[in-house]
Image (spheres, rainbow, N blue to C red):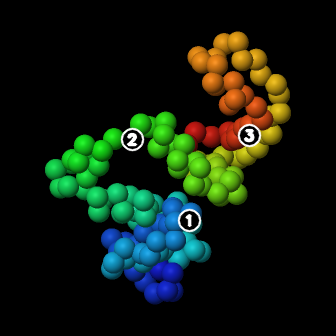
Amino acid sequence: LPGKSCKLVPVESAYIHDMRWQSEAAPEGMEEVHADVPENVSLRFGVRPLSEVLAGECSMGDGSDWLEVTGQHEPLTRRLRNILKDYPWQSLIKEMLQNAEDAGARHFRVLIDRRERADKSLLTREMAGLQGACLWFYNDSVF
């Protein structure tokens, strides 16, 4: 496939840049697929996302990753919160639109929901601070 340098790159040496919020350099010996190549085409050819390539570098060779081996653990809710906190909101909308397109959606909608919500049925009182305006994303396909 054509790389960012406009030269052909073997599939195993190419990656899809799915971590735009990061400005890390390309892994050694690899090149980003050219921006004109649609992501779904790259995936069909077997090109791996950058996140997968970098995660593979953390492997210990026995199926576990270095976080598990060293006893490190981060709760899923904290991990998701940190990912969303570091993710530019403008990119979130683009990502949702790209997911809809990749899934073959014909319709994509974004709804700003400003409704007031009751806090009587929440698990804890502290959750009341999370009640407020939100964005809803809709598409007519399954991703």
Kind of element beneath mark 3? strand
Provide residue 127's location: percent of width, then percent of height: 64, 25
> Amino acid under label 1?
Arg
Q: Is residue 123 left or right of residue 24?
A: right
Per the image, the residue denoted by label 1 is: 20
Q: Is residue 83 left or right of residue 104?
A: left
Q: Residue at x 82, y 25 (%)?
A: 116
How far across and down, in percent of the image, does residue 132 sit?
A: 76, 31
Which numbered disc covers residue 50?
Answer: none
Q: Which residue occupies the extreme top position in the image?
A: 120
Q: How many marks?
A: 3
Is 1 on the left-hand or right-hand side of 136?
A: left
> Reading the chain from its start, which is encountered first: label 1 or label 3?
1
**Disc 2 to disc 1, how far (Cα)?**
23 Å
Q: Position of residue 39 (x, y in %)?
A: 53, 63
Q: Which mark is residue 135?
A: 3
Q: Which of the pair 51/99 is nearer the observer?
A: 51
Check whether the beta carbons of the residues at disc 1 and disc 3 lie within 8 A of each other: no
Residue at far front of view: 126
Residue 7 screen position, x and y as percent? 46, 87
As drawn, the label of residue 74 is 2
Type of amino acid at the residue the image marks with label 3: Leu
